[in-house]
Image (cartoon, grey):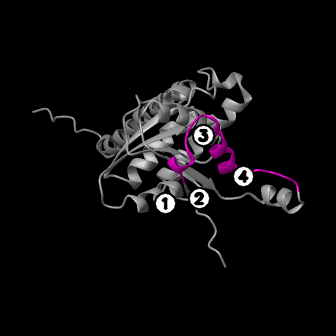
Amino acid sequence: MKRRASEPKSAAKKTPAKKRGAIRRGFLPFLLVCVAGFLIAGAVALYNAARILQLNEPPMRSDALVVPGGSPVRSFHAARLYRDGYAPMIYVGIPVETSGDAKIRKAGIAWPREEELAVQILLKEGVPRHAVSLYGPAKSTAEEAEVLARTHTKKPCSLLAVTSPYHTRRVSIVFRDAMPECAITVASTPDEAFPDAWWQSQDAARQVVLEIMKILFYKAGWRYYSPTPA
C-alpha cells in the first residue's frame, strides 16, 4: 500500500499567520475608505456651513423676544417683530465688558455699551421703554441661557430669540438645552449678510470658523462664565 503523503507541518503552522496577515491587509483599505469618507463628508459640510449654521424658523407668538448679546443690529428685527405683535416685551442681553472697552471708558472717551445701543435702536424703532428688560451680564451664549432659565425656572414659557444668521443654530441648541420647559423659536435677522459662499467674505469666514469651534466647545461640555466679583 502506498502511504498518503503527509501535509507539511510548516503549512499547518503558517495558516493562522496567513489569516492574520490577510486581516491586516484587508483592514488597511477599509481604514483608508473610512478616512476618505470622513474627509469628503467634512468637506461637504464645510462647503455648506452657511446653510447648516443658519436656522431661520418662522416666528411664533411668544411670551417675550430675546436679543442675545453680540450685535446691537439684531434689535432692528426684534423691533419689527414686536410691532407685528409677536411678543409683548423684549429681553436684551448685557455682555460682559471687555478689557478694551473698559480702557476706552477709563480714558474718559464716550463709548456706549452694547446693550445701551440695542435699547436706543429699539426705542428709535417704536418700542416703548417699559417693554424692554435687560438681563445679564453674561460672557457667553450658554451663560445667557442659564440667566434666562432662572427667570423661567420650571414653568412653561415661549421665547422668540432674534440673532445673527451665523448664530442661530447655536442659540437653538443652547437655549433648548437650558430651558427644556420653554418653547424656543429662533429668528434670523435679515439685517446682517451671511452668504452661502462664505469663504468669499472675510467676516463670514471668520464667523463660520468661530461658530464651528464654539459649537464643538459647547458639545464637549465646556462653558465660559463671567468673572465672579471679588
Could you tell me which secondary element the residue under label 4 belongs to? loop
Question: Identity of the amino acid at label 2?
Answer: Ala
**Which of 183 and 37 lies nearest the eye of the viewer?**
183
- How many residues crowd mark 4 within 10 Å: few (<14), some (14–19), many (20+)? some
The residue drawn where x is 85% and y is 63% is 106
The reply, left or right, for residue 97 in relation to residue 68 is right
Q: What stretch of residues is rendered in magenta?
A: 109-133
Q: Is residue 85 visible?
A: yes
Tell me the residue at 56%/27% (across/down).
50
Quadrant location of residue 155?
Answer: bottom left
In the image, residue 193 lies at what x, y percent?
63, 25
Across and down, in percent, residue 66 comes to: 49, 45
Marks 1 and 4 sit apart, C-alpha to C-alpha, by 19 Å
Residue situated furthest right in the rendering: 107
Chain-order first, disc 1 or disc 4: 4
Comparing labels 1 and 3, the label whose residue is closer to the camera: 3
> Whole-percent x and y of residue 207?
64, 36
Which of the numbered marks, if any, corresponds to residue 138?
2
Tell me, yes or no, whether the highlighted magenta stretch contains residue 145: no
Amino acid marked by disc 3? Leu
Disc with the residue nearer the chain's start (2 vs 1)? 2
Residue at 40% over, 28% down: 58
Depth check: give the residue in front, 163 or 91.
91
Q: Could you tell which of marks 2 and 4 lies nearer the N-terminus?
A: 4
Tell me the crowding category of disc 3: few under 14, some 14 to 19, or many 20 or more residues within 10 angstroms, Cα based: many
Q: Distance between the residues labelled 3 and 4?
A: 15 Å
Q: Name the residue under label 3.
A: 122
CA–CA distance between discs 3 and 2?
Answer: 20 Å
